[in-house]
Image (tube, helix red, strand yellow):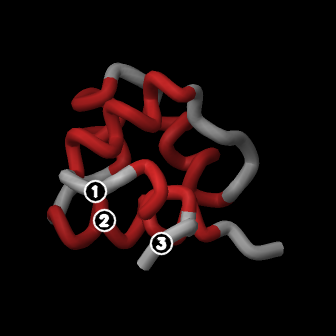
Amino acid sequence: MENPFGERLRALRQEKGIGQVQLAKEIDVGKSIVSLWEIGRCEPTLSKLVALSRFFGVSIDYLAGLED
């Protein structure tokens, strides 16, 4: 099953050179949550999507795979 959000999240995290633990601390979630997002087992809340968008400097549409 396709998981554009998880794939983009992993790519952005790796481009920034940070691990799941550091990202989790930055947006105030547990490390396991970041892992679950990346493998497509769960999805972030709107407030966490906004936090991710701001942290990485990308749009929510980009994170969701709606734009390139």
Amino acid type shown at disc 2: Leu
Which quadrant of the figure contains the C terminus?
Answer: bottom left
Label whose residue precedes the other's in the sequence (3 or 2):
2
Lateral position of residue 32 relative to residue 8, left or right: right
- Provide the secondary structure element on which disc 3 rests: loop
Q: Are marks 1 and 2 in contact (CB under 8 Å)?
A: yes
Q: Residues within 10 Å of mark 2 (few under 14, many from 20)?
A: some
For the residues labelled 1 and 2, the Cα–Cα distance comes to 9 Å
Could you tell me which secondary element the residue under label 2 belongs to? helix
Residue under pointer 3: 67
> Looking at the picture, does residue 66 appear above or below residue 48?
below
Position of 47 relative to 66 (above/below):
above
Q: Which numbered disc, 1 or 2, marks the residue closer to the eye?
A: 1
Which of 48 and 15 lies nearest the eye of the viewer? Answer: 48
Residue that lies at the very extreme toward the right in this rendered image? 1
Residue name at image x 74 percent, y 74 percent: 2
Residue for point 44% across, 29% down: 48
Residue 62, picture quadrant? bottom left
Q: Which residue is mark 2?
A: 12
Q: Earlier in the sequence, mark 1 or mark 2?
A: 2
Circle 3 packing at 10 Å, graded few (<14), some (14-19), many (20+), is few
Q: Quadrant of residue 42?
A: top right
Of 38 and 59, which appears nearest the observer? Answer: 59
Q: Which mark, residue 58?
A: 1
Q: Are marks 3 and 2 in contact (CB under 8 Å)?
A: no
Q: Nearer the viewer, mark 3 or mark 2?
A: 3
| Amino acid type shown at disc 1 | Val
Q: How many marks?
A: 3
In front here: 16 or 61?
A: 61
Q: Residue furthest bottom?
A: 68
